[in-house]
Image: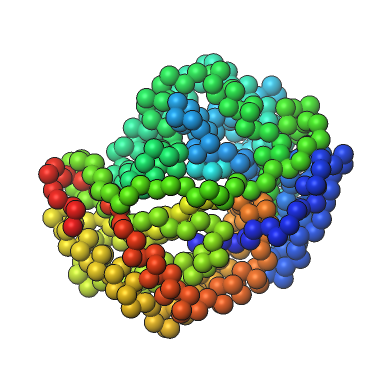
Amino acid sequence: MASPDVVRHAAGAQPGRAGAASRAVTRTISDDPLGGTVRRTVLPSGLRVLTEAIPTMRSVSFGIWVTVGSRDETGPQAGAAHFLEHLLFKGTHKRTALEISSEIEAVGGETNAFTTKEYTCYYARVLDEDLPLAIDVMCDAVADSLLEPADVETERGVILEEIAMHDDEPGDEVHDLFARAVYGGHPLGRLISGTEETVTPMTRRQIQSFYRRRYTAPQIVIAAAGNLDHAAVVKLVRQALRGTPLDTDPAEPGTPRPTTPTVRTKPATVLVEPKETEQAHVILGCPGIDRVDERRFALGVLNNVLGGGMSSRLFQEIRERRGLAYSVYSYASQYADSGLFAVYAGCAPGKVDEVLQLTRAELARVAADGLTGAEVARGKGMSKGSFVLGLEDTGSRMSRLAKGELLYGDLMPVDELLARVDAVTVADVNTLAAELLSRPMSLAVVGPFGEHDFAG
């Protein structure tokens, strides 16, 4: 579920962007009383290192973020980014797969990775004293993976099982069906994992080519948050990458993904996936706004009030008052050049028409009449509170640094973000609601339906 963005689009060029620097360039981004000291270094290769020093913590979260996701694949490549994410932990010239995992686990740390539609992340969380080990292991895995043929075949089987497992989770499947309803054949409408038809024939050569073309130093951001020293982190990163394919000639760092042209979406449509399930899963929604749209703070407030918690209008009406669904919520997804706004509900198949009728009625009511001042104040409080509480976790802070650099090219100070939320007015929210919630709505349904008419 999306929340108000924590960074802003760069107003101008960053240090090191004017031309490929022959030496590292470092600057202090912020010394925030509600956060730690944030520093940014651009290495000669174009790779960027950002840290947030928080001396009161005894742990560090360390992440390697790559500006490549499933939307960067061609049709036949669908699933390549996710396939690669699996393979990078399978062994390098220095370490076997067992050594990669056991070295971190031996000090009580944890590692993981995930792929999205616009980026991929590999991360570790360790005690502060074990940060040098985490940097060496993670940089080794991401920069110098062997992609052995036997490992490709092993992980192909794992991924096919993952795809099959996903198909057995209708509550997850309906989100993919909704993306397809809105985006059609565009990469944003495809499964991140790929499909059995694309993963089965994918060759090691194709994956290796994707790896070396996409995982380049200018497209990588390394972020760390916790009890650390920035200069020491930069030094350790440079040592860990020395002699690897990411130790390259001087280059300019990458820039955020272009925000134009806007992705073309399909006309409102209904997609139904017949499946013998005990519960029907439905998503009703429309194209939303992109992540640099100035209305994103108002959208966060609107989402909170409409379906963002137990006190939200939809939860109160559909679950609390009528008991029609166990789970009901709204959410916003935002990409560089597009976005979604939608409502999800899981209910008994026989109640789906009533749930959809109530949902449509509530959306129409908010579009026509707007929210009250008290509701907007509550929605703003939810936005601010959830963000500030997230600052207590080093993983959230690390993600904030990386997403700011990758997605926006700049980091919004905590005080400024809170001020932007505070500045949202009732008129801002209601103007957005009138425009957004009046858009034609697409519907995705997974459940035991054959000829059922959902057109209403």
View extreme (bottom): residue: 373
Q: For the N terminus, which image quadrant?
A: bottom left
View extreme (right): residue: 22
The answer to which image quadrant residue 246 occupies is top right
Left or right of 246: which side holds 80? left
In-front residue for pair 162/214:
214
Can residue 178 be seen here? The reply is no
In-front residue for pair 376/383:
376
Q: Position of residue 121 (x, y in %)?
A: 58, 42
Q: Looking at the image, is 77 positioned above or below residue 414?
A: above
Left or right of 424: which side holds 277? left
* Image label count: 0
View extreme (top): residue: 149
Can residue 442 be seen here? The reply is yes
Q: Position of residue 412 (x, y in %)?
A: 66, 63
Q: Position of residue 148 (x, y in %)?
A: 58, 18
Q: Position of residue 203 (x, y in %)?
A: 50, 18
Left or right of 175: which side holds 324? left
Q: Residue at x 87, y 41 (%)?
A: 23
Q: For the C terminus, which image quadrant?
A: bottom left
Q: Residue at x 32, y 49 (%)?
A: 267
Q: Looking at the image, is 81 positioned above or below residue 64?
A: above
Q: Residue at x 29, y 44 (%)?
A: 170
